């Protein structure tokens, strides 16, 4: 079982567990985090400049372009992991 699969299956993560994230997962997690914390969508979805590289997303497990969670303002990925059922 892959490292990302174990994280998704356990449904519990720490902010340090997610090291690489794809754009769809980062944007979704940021959106859900802002709704939970502030009751409204984010004013800014992501940083204007991000460095992407080929890799595997630690949230969805897809092999795609990934970046660091900081580019999405360190959202709460537990909110999106509860929506993904493996």
Image (tube, rainbow, N blue to C red):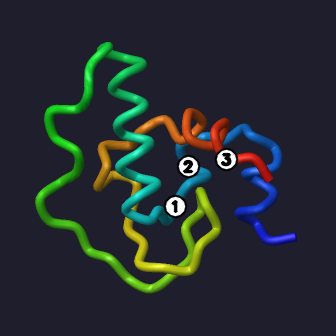
Residue ID at (74%, 52%): 7
Q: Is residue 79 above or below residue 8?
A: above
Crowdedness near tag 2: few (<14), some (14–19) or many (≥20) residues, C-alpha within 10 Å: few
Q: Residue furthest right?
A: 1
Proximity of marks 2 and 3: CB atoms separated by less than 8 Å = no
Q: Are marks 1 and 2 in contact (CB under 8 Å)?
A: yes
Q: Does residue 86 appear to the left or right of 43 in the view shown?
A: right
Residue 19: numbered disc: 1
Q: Are marks 1 and 3 in contact (CB under 8 Å)?
A: no
Of the residues tagged 1 and 3, which is closer to the observer? 3
Q: Secondary structure at mark 1?
A: loop
Per the model, the C-alpha gap separating discs 1 and 2 is 7 Å
The image shows residue 15, relative to residue 21, as above or below, that is above
Residue 31 numbered tag = none
Question: Number of numbered discs present?
Answer: 3
Query: Residue 74 versus residue 64: which sits nearer the camera?
Result: 64
User: Residue at left 61%, top 52%?
Assistant: 17
* Residue at image location 74% in from the left, 40% down from the top: 11
Determine whether 31 is above or below 62 in the image: above
Residue linked to disc 2: 16
Query: Disc 2 and disc 3: Cα gap in Å?
Result: 19 Å
Pick whichever of labels 1 and 3 is earlier in the sequence: 1
19, above or below 8, in the image = below
Q: Which residue is mark 3?
A: 84
| Residue 42: quarter of image | top left
**Residue 15: percent from the left, percent from the top?**
53, 42
């Amino acid at each position: 079982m892959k490292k990302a699969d174990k994280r998704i299956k356990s449904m519990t993560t720490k902010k340090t567990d997610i090291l690489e994230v794809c754009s769809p997962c980062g944007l979704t997690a940021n959106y859900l985090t802002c709704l939970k914390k502030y009751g409204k969508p984010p004013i800014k979805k992501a940083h204007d400049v991000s460095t992407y590289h080929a890799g595997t997303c630690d949230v969805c497990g897809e092999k795609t372009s990934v970046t660091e969670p900081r580019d999405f303002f360190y959202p709460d990925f537990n909110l999106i992991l509860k929506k993904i059922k493996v």
